[in-house]
């Protein structure tokens, strides 16, 4: 399986800088002061470089919600029980979650993937890619074997391959998994050296006492497993999650297919950091959507080298912030396609 992962990584090529420059030239010809549309212009240039089109049109968009359970929930790190994971998966599949609402607003599809839910789920819309039923308790042992982590990455990449073959060209990352902010905080600590007290957030809304306990659990997981900072796969396997590994695959798969991938919040950004360590070129295909209310999120984005488009104090996950930014990407595309140039509008430049 490692050879298959290497093949995915090696298939990721640099973005096409000539189209980045062509997009810049077109933006400078539009009836506005240079750079006056700020981040919309940054988006337009980046997606041009990614896709090899100055004016790409994203007719088929998808948020891929990876779902998996976490053995560390045995330690009482969440305000919600683990049973919520499969219940929310069914909510996604029935169209009732926040990400479904925002996806409909953006004209996008929600793809729900069972990569590690600790339950037997059946639904005609469910994408079944289960590697195992939840991770082990990382506070006592490694969350996954290295082989399981690699398999989950490959499953995520395969999902993107399937949808890219159907004409989808813009992707977003989403997640569902009670306990996954604990795993994401541990990944942040292991890969950057950030102290657990600065990495661990409130997750589902825990109080001060449970937050302190959550910090201790992350510290314990790091002490017991001793993840190797220079080996992102080792970190992912020992203190990560199946859905996080799946999202690493989604990001690598999008880059492989030359598709932009919009990164959601804290959990998705932990996956983005792992992906960037495994395949540095993949970072150029990522667009950060929003700065989460989770205190460690900014540190994750900084480590990847990303800057968020929005700051909305959101901390829901699911892909909600990422899907919200589909609207901004579509807006940037319309600016490129529909806005008049100085010449076409007969407007003087000076």
Image: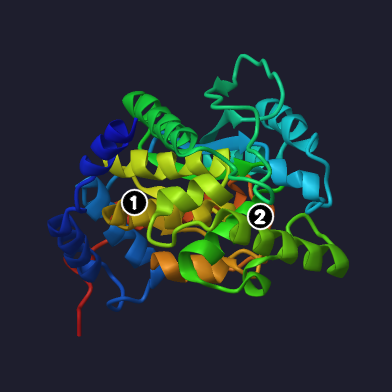
Which residue of the protein is positioned furthest toward the left in this rendering?
Answer: 18
Look at the picture and state if 41 lies above or below 36.
Answer: above
Q: Position of residue 72 (x, y in %)?
A: 71, 46
User: Which residue bears the numbered disc 2?
Assistant: 181
Task: Please give left or right for residue 339 compared with residue 314 in the image.
Answer: left
Q: Position of residue 266 (x, y in %)?
A: 58, 58
> Residue at the location (67% across, 37% down)?
69
Look at the picture and state if 305 lies above or below 178.
Answer: below
Residue 227 visible to the viewer: yes
Q: CA distance from mark 2 to mark 1?
A: 21 Å
> Residue at the location (73% across, 58% down)?
203
> Residue at the location (72% across, 24% down)?
119
Which residue of the protein is positioned furthest toward the bottom in this rendering?
Answer: 350
Give the numbered dot on residue 38. Answer: none
Total marks in image: 2
Q: Position of residue 227 (x, y in %)?
A: 50, 56
Q: Which is more toward the observer, 334 or 342?
A: 334
User: Which residue bears the numbered disc 1?
Assistant: 278
> Residue at the location (62% across, 35% down)?
67
Q: Position of residue 169 (x, y in %)?
A: 35, 37
Q: In what element is the residue under mark 2?
A: helix
Q: Which is more toward the observer, 257 or 106?
A: 257
Q: Which is more toward the observer, 216 or 262?
A: 216
Look at the picture and state if 40 lies above or below 88.
Answer: below
* Quadrant of the image containing the N terminus: top left
Task: Please give left or right for residue 295 compared with residue 106 in the image.
Answer: right
Q: In what element is the residue under mark 1?
A: helix
Look at the picture and state if 3 lies above or below 345.
Answer: above
């Amino acid at each position: 399986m490692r050879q298959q992962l290497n093949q995915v990584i090696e298939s990721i090529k640099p973005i096409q800088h000539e189209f980045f420059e062509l997009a810049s030239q077109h933006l400078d010809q539009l009836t506005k002061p240079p750079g006056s549309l700020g981040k919309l212009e940054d988006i337009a240039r980046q997606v041009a470089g990614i896709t090899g089109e100055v004016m790409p049109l994203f007719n088929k968009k998808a948020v891929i919600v990876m779902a998996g359970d976490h053995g560390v929930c045995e330690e009482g790190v969440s305000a919600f029980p683990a049973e919520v994971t499969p219940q929310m998966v069914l909510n996604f599949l029935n169209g009732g979650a926040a990400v479904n609402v925002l996806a409909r607003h953006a004209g996008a599809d929600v793809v729900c993937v069972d990569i590690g839910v600790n339950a037997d789920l059946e639904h005609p819309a469910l994408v079944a890619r289960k590697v195992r039923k939840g991770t082990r308790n990382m506070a006592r042992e490694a969350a996954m074997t290295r082989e399981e982590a690699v398999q989950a990455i490959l499953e995520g990449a395969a999902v993107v391959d399937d949808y890219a073959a159907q004409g989808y060209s813009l992707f977003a990352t989403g997640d569902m998994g009670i306990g996954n902010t604990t795993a994401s905080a541990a990944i942040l600590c292991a890969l950057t050296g950030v102290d657990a007290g600065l990495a661990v957030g409130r997750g589902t809304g825990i109080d001060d006492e449970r937050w302190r306990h959550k910090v201790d659990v992350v510290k314990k997981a790091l002490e017991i497993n001793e993840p190797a900072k220079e080996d992102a796969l080792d970190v992912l396997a020992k203190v990560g999650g199946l859905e996080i590994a799946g999202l690493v695959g989604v990001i690598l798969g999008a880059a492989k297919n030359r598709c932009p991938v919009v990164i959601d919040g804290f959990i998705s950004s932990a996956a983005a950091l792992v992906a960037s360590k495994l395949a540095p070129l993949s970072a150029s295909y990522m667009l950060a959507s929003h700065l989460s209310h989770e205190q460690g999120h900014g540190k994750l984005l900084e480590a990847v080298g990303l800057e968020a488009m929005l700051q909305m104090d959101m901390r829901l996950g699911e892909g909600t912030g990422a899907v919200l930014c589909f609207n901004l990407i579509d807006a940037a595309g319309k600016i490129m396609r529909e806005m008049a140039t100085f010449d076409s509008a007969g407007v003087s430049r000076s």
